[in-house]
Amino acid sequence: MAQSKIWLSSPHMGTNEEKYVKQAFDTNWVAPLGPNVDAFEEAIQDYVGNEVSVAALSSGTGAIHLALEILGVSSGDEVLCQSFTFSASANPIKYLGANPIFVDSERDTWNLCPVLLEEAINDRIQKGKKPKAIVAVHLYGMPYKINEIKAISEKYNIPVVEDSAEALGSTFNGVKCSSFGDIGILSFNGNKIITTSGGGALISKNSAYRKKAIFLATQARDDAPHYQHSNVGYNYRMSNILAGIGRGQMEVLDDRVAARRANYELYVKELSYSTELEFLPEPAGYFSNRWLSCILTPSFEIREKVRLLLLDHNIESRPLWKPMHLQPIFENAPNYSNGTSEDLFNRGLCLPSGSNLTKEEVLSIIQLIKTVFS
């Protein structure tokens, strides 16, 4: 009998999601917006704190798109973007006709390298084009170097879009991620730490940014008794039904973070005996939600040996993100590289990390990995 598939990161429902969705049906609030959207935004706002405003949207990608437009990015502009990330961090730059400038990572957090970032800014300025924004990502739930990136942002007066798609529940010095940048974004895709099936949010301490995001996300309708439009708008608002799922998910978020961190700690405990395997520890003051537990193997060949062994046992794993500057769609984009992200991609593997994994499932994965290094 085939073993049931163990997924990398599957949805994990709580107890009240169905109740809130049923309320939407019972009251006929099945169209976009409604009481669940309002309550979901309030729940996110209360959780993140730090005086933020929240707009619930149809996706994290849409949130990045709106964030860049709100910050004034337009055709021909340049936007600095972390190379070691998912394509959704970079694609919205192209939506606006702007050009991504990719910057490599540092080893401490695997995120945007402040040294390379400043080099890139100075080089772009010398070439006559000051970048309009920085897209910095908290990869796999690990906060990027907040203080260093913020200092560079302020020094050169370039705003930061804080991509927290993978980092809800993560903190830096006790402050929740998504509240550090000029605009933060969240994702509630099906594989994230909590999900609304599909969805996202735009977050900012600047309430005017939220207001503009909602205006643009609802087709940029002018204040008139008829349909009148002076701007190009988008259909990016979250539905009341999906927001009902989100309300229930917010109630179990802390439990989901604890479960994923427990998975990571078990992997570390059982696999640290091998000097051939590396993990990403938390620097002082950092708290990662450990959205995905990742390992670094000695080589591409060993990484593939582990991945294929797990696949043979119906267990999903995934190489770390392939850097954007290596993607065919972005092969002609300028990039400032130190080789870090290429090395991480070649040697790194994401292990099953869902909050609904059993301890026995994690231990079975560990035993298979041990056979590669025995």
Image (cartoon, rainbow, N blue to C red):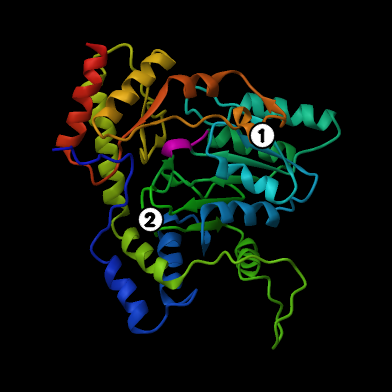
- SS at circle 2: loop
Residue 39 visible in the shown view:
yes
Residue depth check, mark 1 versus mark 2: number of the one nearer the observer: 1
Which amino acid is tagged 2? Answer: Thr
Question: In the picture provided, is 337 more to the left or to the right than 274?
Answer: right
Determine which of the numbered discs, if any, sits on residue 330 in the image: 1
Q: Is residue 309 above or below residue 43?
A: above
Residue bounds of the magenta highlight: 139-144
Q: Can you name the residue that lies furthest to the bottom here?
A: 225
Q: Which residue is mark 2?
A: 195
Picture quadrant of residue 9: top left
Determine which of the numbered discs, if any, sits on residue 268 in the image: none
Q: What crowding class fits label 2: few (fewer than 14 Cα within 10 Å), some (14-19), or many (20 or more)?
A: many
| Residue 256 locus on image (x, y percent) | 29, 48
Q: Can you name the residue that lies furthest to the right here?
A: 128
Residue 142 visible in the shown view:
no
Q: What crowding class fits label 1: few (fewer than 14 Cα within 10 Å), some (14-19), or many (20 or more)?
A: some
In the rendered image, the quadrant that contains the C terminus is: top left
Which amino acid is tagged 1? Answer: Phe
Q: State which tag comes first along the sequence, 1 or 2.
A: 2
Q: Is residue 120 above or below residue 37?
A: above
- SS at circle 1: helix
| Residue 70 locus on image (x, y percent) | 69, 57
Residue at 72% of width from left, 51% of height from top?
Answer: 96
282 or 94: nearer the eye?
A: 94
Question: In the picture provided, is 36 more to the left or to the right than 13?
Answer: right
